[in-house]
Image (cartoon, rainbow, N blue to C red):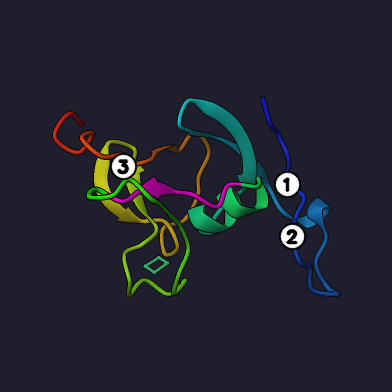
């Protein structure tokens, strides 16, 4: 079980003490992030670069544009498919799962 909020860049005015930590789940793994940060940022801070897998070739996909245009970061969030994790904010208990080839029809 990986629980880390490290791997982050910080501004000079910000510290971990000022932000509220929340637990969330990615592919059945419990992780820690910060309330109201983009889900993709929380995943990256936990060392997760592959958010989903291409439906055709099964290749890993993750953050590409980071501004909601490319849809490469989409995942299933709280049961909703195709959510862009780079523009969706993290909250306590958010459940995220990757789209994998053949899984889209199952979920
Ligand atoms: S990284 Fe492009 S939409 Fe999220």
- x and y percentages locating residue 6 in the rendered image: 77, 50
Q: Is residue 72 left or right of residue 5?
A: left
Q: Nearer the viewer, mark 3 or mark 2?
A: 3
Q: Earlier in the sequence, mark 3 or mark 2?
A: 2
Q: CA distance from mark 3 to mark 1?
A: 24 Å
Q: Residues within 10 Å of mark 1 (few under 14, many from 20)?
A: some
Across and down, in percent, residue 10 comes to 78, 67
Which quadrant of the frame does ligand 1 lie within?
A: bottom left
Distance (Cα) linking label 2 and label 1: 7 Å
Segment tinted magenta in the rendering:
48-54
Residue at position x 45%, y 63% in the image: 86
Q: Main secondary structure of the magenta part?
A: loop
Per the image, the residue denoted by label 2 is: 8
- In this rendering, is residue 104 above or below 42? above
Q: Residue furthest left?
A: 105
Disc 2, disc 1: CB below 8 Å?
yes
Q: Which residue is mark 1?
A: 5
Quarter of the image with the N terminus in it: top right
Q: Secondary structure at mark 3?
A: loop
Q: Nearer the viewer, mark 3 or mark 1?
A: 3
Q: Secondary structure at mark 2?
A: loop
Q: Position of residue 47 (x, y in %)?
A: 65, 47
Q: Is residue 33 left or right of residue 82?
A: right
Q: Which mark is residue 99?
A: 3
Query: Is the CB of mark 3 within 8 Å of ligand 1?
Result: no
Instruction: Determine the CA span between mark 3 and mark 2.
Output: 25 Å
Q: Residue at x 50, y 45 (%)?
A: 91
The residue closer to the viewer here, 97 or 35, is: 97
Mark 3 surroundings: few (<14), some (14-19) or many (≥20) residues within 10 A: many
């Amino acid at each position: 079980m990986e629980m880390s909020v490290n791997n982050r860049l910080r501004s000079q005015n910000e510290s971990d003490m000022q932000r509220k930590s929340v637990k969330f789940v990615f592919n059945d793994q419990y992780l820690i992030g910060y309330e109201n940060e983009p889900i993709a940022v929380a995943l990256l801070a936990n060392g997760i670069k592959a958010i989903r897998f291409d439906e055709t070739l099964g290749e890993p996909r993750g953050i590409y544009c980071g501004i909601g245009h490319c849809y490469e970061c989409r995942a299933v969030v709280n049961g909703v498919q195709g959510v862009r994790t780079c523009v969706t904010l993290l909250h306590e208990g958010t459940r995220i799962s990757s789209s994998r080839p053949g899984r889209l029809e199952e979920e």
